[in-house]
Image (spheres, rainbow, N blue to C red):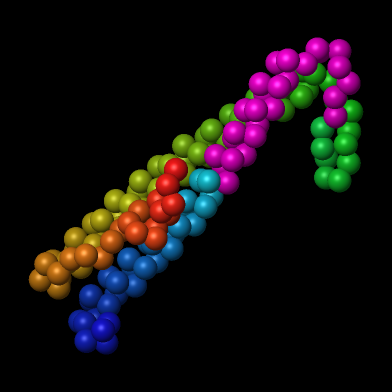
Amino acid sequence: MQGNLPPEAQEKIEQLQDLQETAQQVAVQKQETESGLTEAQNAQNELENIDEDTTMYRQVGDLLVETDYDAAEDDLDEKVDSLELRLETLEKQEDRVQDQFESLQDELEDLLGGAGGMGGPAGPGGPGAGGA
């Protein structure tokens, strides 16, 4: 079908496919970041229930190294802050990609005389598929 389209339309379709791929990659990164954030927040909550004199360890590569309460708390706080910032960045990137996709899709529809039904990155089978 693409062989019968004008070169400009073919180019826009390729750009749409690239954006859809980017949207999927961002969705995967966002999911991994959300998972890491949840894990770190759970660790923070557990840390609140631990006596400050309890011997604790942190993982460094394949080793467990003894650490103190304050250092563990600082590390977790820093990790949560970093992951929250990363998640915010990914959400903005996800919005930008979606906007670019919709804009490019509109351009393609105009170019082809209003033929629609392309489906966006969050459409069927996209990064939003499968529920929350």
Please provide the residue range marked out in magenta: 32-57
117 in relation to 99, above or below: below
Kindly identify the residue that appears in the image at 88 percent across and 21 percent down.
Answer: 55
The C terminus lies in which quarter of the figure? top left
**Front-most of residues 120 and 67:** 120
- Residue 93 visible within the image: no
- Residue 102 visible within the image: yes
Give the percent coordinates (x, y) of residue 121.
35, 57
Kindly identify the residue that appears in the image at 50 percent across and 39 percent down.
Answer: 87
Dividing the picture into quadrants, the one containing residue 44 is: top right
**Is residue 52 on the magenta stretch?**
yes
Total number of numbered labels? Answer: 0
Residue 85 located left or right of residue 112: right
Give the percent coordinates (x, y) of residue 73.
72, 21
The N terminus lies in which quarter of the figure? bottom left
**Front-most of residues 45 and 108:** 45
**Is residue 54 on the magenta stretch?**
yes
Q: Is the magenta stretch mostly helix, strand or loop?
A: helix
Give the percent coordinates (x, y) of residue 8.
23, 76
Give the percent coordinates (x, y) of residue 21.
43, 63
53 in relation to 41, above or below: above
Kindly identify the residue that appears in the image at 65 percent across and 31 percent down.
Answer: 40
